[in-house]
Amino acid sequence: MTGPVLTRRHGCTLTPGIGSRLCQGLLLAVLITGLSACQGGAVDKAAESTDKNTSAATVSKKSGQAHRKKHTQARDKAKKGVADQKDGQEPDDKELVYNVETAKARTGAAQAVFNSTAVLQADREAEVSPKATGVVEEIRAEAGDRVKKGQVLAVLESDQQRLRLQQARANYEKTRNNWERSKKLLAKGLANAESVSNLKYETRVLKSLLDQAQLDFDNTRIKSPIDGTLVKRFIKAGSLVQNGEKAFKVVDFDSLQAVVNVPEMQLQKIRTGLPARLRIDALDNAEVAAQVLRVSPAVDEKTGTFAVTLAIPSPQVGLRPGLFARVAIVYDQHPDAVLVDKNAFIREDQTTFVWKVDGDGVSKQVIRTGYEMPDSIEVLEGLRPGDEVVTTGKNNLSPDARIHVIDYD
């Protein structure tokens, strides 16, 4: 009898019949399990890839929404710029409208002016001194008083001078009377001609002595030598003053002048009679009319300047010697010149130009200038009276710029 045949495969012992089928079932189970494991890894990788694709899609969706929102905002801003432009407001960057201020060219006097500074000084002033030595007995004027020429400002003690004056006057009058009487007797033949002649010369001598005594007495009175204002007193009552000592200072304010040192290059331009202006800082920049009174013919070799004296024909109240003044001497004038506000001009290298208003735009206008004043400049070529030019906001303009003129009225 033949026994069962055993077959061993993959670790299984196979027997004919039922055993063989059982082992085959186990192998199939193992194969299915391995296949499931491989399929599971692939599924996980597929899931991971799906998640990544889903996240990228989400980011792409958000980016698209942001781009559409930005595009919408830009479109709204552009629409708003057009609306603002219609309302006179500043539109968007694609078509800017610049707010500017303007001024019109006009006709006026163009002046060539030499500017300098000076200190006011009086042409007539005096430091008053006594002509005698003595004690101050009385003060008759104080600083600030208006005084006349010959007015007594102070009195010195003068007892001795008074006595000598009285004696000299008595001697003179006595001799003069004798002379007058002798002349009558001589006419009648009752007097000697020689004695009459002697009385005549004696009278003249006594008159000289009387005049000297009178002068000595007058010198005890300190008097003003000019009309003016007493600006300072240097002596006090009861003090002893010497002959020639400074006692008072008197200034004639109506003789105020300004002396300007002008460079020698201006020597041919400045002449007597030219008009001038003085601006006084201490009097709230008050302007005072002046005139060239004298021009020194000599040039100072050390400074290279010459002195020009300006007179003030009608001094204003408040002017004082020592005040600082800004001087403008007008040495040439063009009465019917074209003038434009000084703020309108732009200089580039050797070219001067302005932005001329043309409707709501501007054009670059090259001009040639003449005399320059504090607030305006003379235009020799390039503009006519009535032309409107930009004065404020000119630095941002270009030939294709659009403008909006601001009117403050």
Image (tube, grey):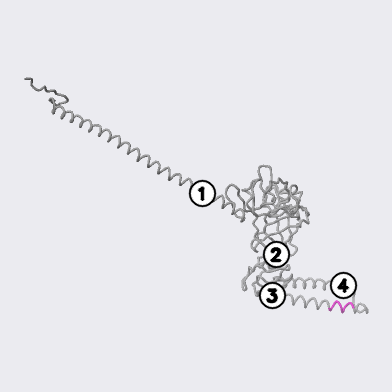
Label 4–label 3 contact, CB within 8 A:
no
What kind of residue is marked 4?
Ser
Q: Quadrant of residue 103?
A: bottom right
Badge 1 or badge 2: first in the primary sequence: 1
300 inside magenta stretch = no
Horizontal arrangement in the rendering, residue 140 relative to residue 199 (left or right): left
Name the residue tied to disc 4: 197
Badge 2 or badge 4: first in the primary sequence: 2
Name the residue tied to disc 1: 72
Distance, label 3 to label 1, CA atoms, is: 115 Å
What kind of residue is marked 1?
Thr
Q: Position of residue 400 (x, y in %)?
A: 65, 46
Distance, label 1 to label 4, CA atoms, is: 134 Å
Disc number placed over residue 126 in the picture, else none? 2
Badge 4 or badge 3: first in the primary sequence: 3
Report the span colored magenta. 177-183
Q: Is residue 365 above or below residue 408?
A: above
